[in-house]
Amino acid sequence: ASKNYSAQVIDFLYNQDSEELSLELVTELIKYIDRTQGEGAILVFLPGWDKISTLNRMLTQEGLSERAGYLVIPLHSMLSTVSQKSVFNRPPRGVRKIVIATNIAETSITIDDVVYVVDCGR
């Protein structure tokens, strides 16, 4: 199994500090869900805009972009209303939607095509 994950992810799992959040681990989990599970949007809860924007960049660097069949949508109050409303649109068939939000979205909105939730517990 260690051949599928970077040394940093394996090290984090062995030495996990409950206060530390590994965005690389979150990225690997999203990729795992995408590889092994059926269709449906993935909703990721993170603690703040800095983590949301960093994970958004990391996913793009990992190849999870629109060209590759992914629609990554950051959701935060700092973004425009138009951007925020885009989370409710269903992507075209064959495109995996990944919404990255703070846990405030957990109780305030319902995204009807979300099937998988990654809650970082912050």
Image (cartoon, rainbow, N blue to C red):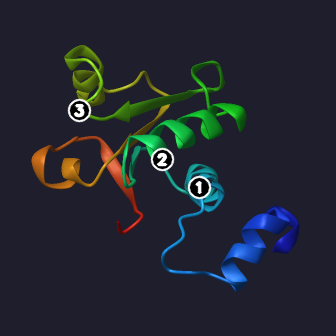
For the C terminus, the quadrant is bottom left
Q: Is residue 108 left or right of residue 88?
A: left
What residue appears at the point 60 percent right and 62 percent down from the top-left corner? 22
Query: Could you classify mark 1 by the number of other residues whose Cα lies within 10 Å: few (under 14), some (14-19), or many (20 or more)?
Result: some
What residue appears at the point 21 percent right and 54 percent down from the top-left corner? 106
Which amino acid type corresponds to the residue marked 3 in the rendered image? Ser
Using the image, tell me which numbered label, if any, was put on residue 51.
2
Pointer 3 residue? 77
Depicted 60 relative to depicted 22: above or below: above
Extreme residue in the right direction: 3
Q: CA distance from mark 1 to mark 3?
A: 21 Å
Q: Nearer the viewer, residue 88 or 46?
A: 46
Quarter of the figure with residue 80: top left
Asked if labels 3 and 1 touch by Cβ distance under 8 angstroms, the answer is no
Number of marks: 3
Pointer 1 residue? 23
Asked if labels 1 and 2 touch by Cβ distance under 8 angstroms, the answer is yes
Query: Could you classify mark 2 by the number of other residues whose Cα lies within 10 Å: few (under 14), some (14-19), or many (20 or more)?
Result: some
Tag 2, which secondary structure?
helix
What residue appears at the point 50 percent right and 80 percent down from the top-left corner? 18
What x and y, as percent, mark residue 67? 64, 18
Q: Earlier in the sequence, mark 2 or mark 1?
A: 1
